[in-house]
Amino acid sequence: MRLRVRLTPGARGDQFAGIHEDADGKAWLKASVRAAPEKGRANVALIAMLAKASGIAKGRFDLVSGHTSRTKTLRIDAVTPAEQAGIEALAAQ
């Protein structure tokens, strides 16, 4: 499974802000983390936040693209239906 995220590092708090579309019509999960965008800290914080909220182990998330960009694509290995529901619930936050 692939998950597209638009990340705002250096925010006041760690949170998800629902699904948003860009100008091309692509859907992104909007997220904010307190971590600074230095040395991958914001990416690590994003994965930790996704893992905690979805109940999926951090090691199953792989940052495929966007290592230094605000728009990121993550791959999640072997997603069960229950885990899929947990990820979809993030969009409702």
Image: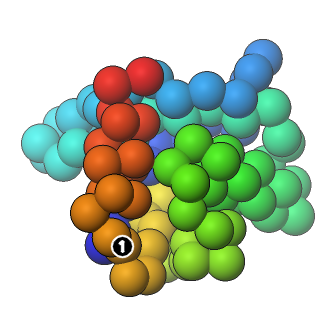
Answer with left or right where residue 86 lies relative to residue 54.
left
Q: Quadrant of the C terminus?
A: top left
Q: Is 54 drawn above or below residue 39 in the view shown?
A: above
Seen from the viewer's position, the closer of residues 10 and 16 is 16
Label 1: how many Cα within 10 Å (few below 14, some 14–19, many 20+): few
Front residue of 58 and 13? 58
Height in image: 90 above or below 64? above
Visible residue check, residue 75: no
Q: Where in the figure is residue 45, as x and y percent of width and height?
A: 76, 50
Please provide percent x and percent y for residue 70: 55, 48
| Quadrant of res 33 | top right
Horizontal placement of 61 versus 52: left or right?
A: left
In the rendered structure, the answer to whether residue 30 lies left or right of residue 35 reads left
| Residue in the picture at 55% in, 63% down | 56
Residue visible at 84% across and 42% down in the picture: 36
Residue occupying the far left of the picture? 25
Residue furthest front in the image: 82
* Quadrant of the drawing holding the N terminus: bottom left
* Residue drawn where x is 30% and y is 49% of the image: 85
**Quadrant of res 29:** top left
Helix, strand or loop under label 1? loop
Q: How many marks?
A: 1
Q: Which residue is mark 1?
A: 79
Left or right, residue 57 beside residue 92: right
The image shows residue 68 at horizontal and vertical percentages of 65, 62
**Residue 21: percent from left, percent from top:** 22, 35
Can residue 91 be seen from the camera position used here?
Answer: yes
Q: Residue at x 28, y 30 (%)?
A: 20
Q: Amino acid at mark 1?
A: Val
User: Which of 37 and 18 lies nearest the eye of the viewer?
Assistant: 18
